[in-house]
Image (tube, grey):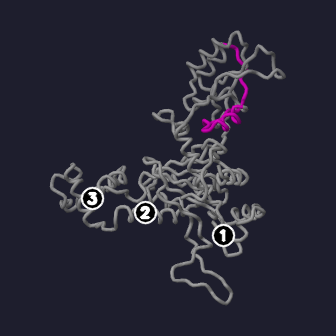
Amino acid sequence: AWPRAMGPHCPETLLPVPVYVSPTTPPQLVLVDVWVAEVDKRRCNQVLKDVSAALPLTNMPHVKRVRRVAAADASPESLKVVLCPVGDSAAGAASWPAAASAVVERHALTPERAQVPGVAPRTREQWEEWTRVWPIVWQKPNRHLEVDVEDPAPEAVAEMRRWMSRAILEASRRGVGARNENEHKKAAGAKEDAHASTETVAFPCVRNAVLLVDPVGSRVVAVGRDATGGWRADGAAADEKNGAIKTHPLRHAAFAAIDAASAWDIATHGADHDPETAAAAAATANFDSGGASDEGPDALPSVGAKRAREKQEKNLGEKLTALHGRPYLCTGYDAYCAREPCVMCAMALVHSRVRRVVYGVPNAKAGALGGGPAAPLHGQRTLNHHYEVFSFGLDEDGFAAAAEAAGRPG
């Protein structure tokens, strides 16, 4: 049960629309030298037709061929047209392609050097910045997909806001992430917000909470709260002389949520799961479906023959879930993290095979899913599982406002 009911004021509406976090590092602005020529507006159509046919920009389809000339540079009737890229050893007209020379002579052009963005932008913000250098085309990434992952449906946005509001509420509860008894007392006071923000930056993955949600039933499967400072290691006892309590550094919120999901699975489906029987059933199912060779499941390659490299089956988690009649780890679940997980937590979510990770506050120091200094972990091609990532991009003030609204009685 949640500590306080979510009132009719709908605190989740305070949250912005979550942004898709690309699994690859966003491109940086790279400028490429090109030859351009000033053309009278009345002759531009014919010149552009000849240039496009003779000198197509095959490697730079995002670059627009024409731009207006600033009033300070020429008359309002002039335009500039991109002719072709400048070669590495280009020092003058002699290095132009023959097609470029023919166009220049035919239309009596005077080429000059300019710079254009060499790569296409991936975000709207990049396009707005780069197009100031030279006009470029804006096209959303993944436009070949049936559903653009950068534009989640309104229903999905509402669900993300709903669960993130609850994750933030859990992370703001008293004692979450506190490192000792004094910190538990400090966490209770609103005057310690500045201290909490400082500690969050200094110690990655503290004051966090993770919700594992089953999107099919729209229900919370498990809740994990940061207990790296307040959780006593198994078998450890408090030092009665100085009152110090031994803590476990691995008890991050993601680990606690995964552990709680495991306990829920055992309580719901029982603990009488036999791995050997399940493995034999999986092998039999694979053999019956044609996954094995014609010689049978025990057939081995002949002497001297190369053993084919085994490839991991796609959608393995879904198939094992259907085979066992119970969730395989956290297959199909969504993880809502109040703060961006660190590398260790993000990798634990990979091994747990969650479907999607949504976080509220980016972690500029140790974030592993796009908010930190390193490349996004979910973009590593060598991983045996990949999940989608969305971020609300909250700062500490936004986090505090959302937590206050979520904890306010309706």
Q: Nearer the viewer, mark 2 or mark 3?
A: 2
Q: Nearer the viewer, residue 107 or 279?
A: 279
Disc assigned to residue 264? 2
Visible residue check, residue 11:
yes
Q: Is residue 165 magenta?
A: no
Separation (CA) of disc 2 from disc 3: 41 Å
User: For this view, does 325 lie left or right of residue 187?
Assistant: left
Q: Residue at x 26, y 57 (%)?
A: 282
Q: Which residues are magenta?
A: 107-131
View extreme (bottom): residue = 241
Q: Is residue 7 above or below residue 341?
A: above
Separation (CA) of disc 1 from disc 2: 26 Å
Q: Is residue 110 magenta?
A: yes
Visible residue check, residue 339:
no
Which of the 4 image quarters holds residue 109? top right
What is the x, y in percent for residue 191? 78, 63
Disc assigned to residue 100? none
Secondary structure under badge 1? loop
Mark 3 residue crowding within 10 angstroms, few (<14) / some (14–19) / many (20+): few
View extreme (front): residue = 410
Which of the 4 image quarters holds residue 382? bottom left
Amino acid bearing label 3: Arg
Q: Nearer the viewer, mark 1 or mark 3?
A: 1
- The residue beneath circle 1 is 178
- The residue beneath circle 3 is 307
What is the x, y in percent for residue 316? 35, 53
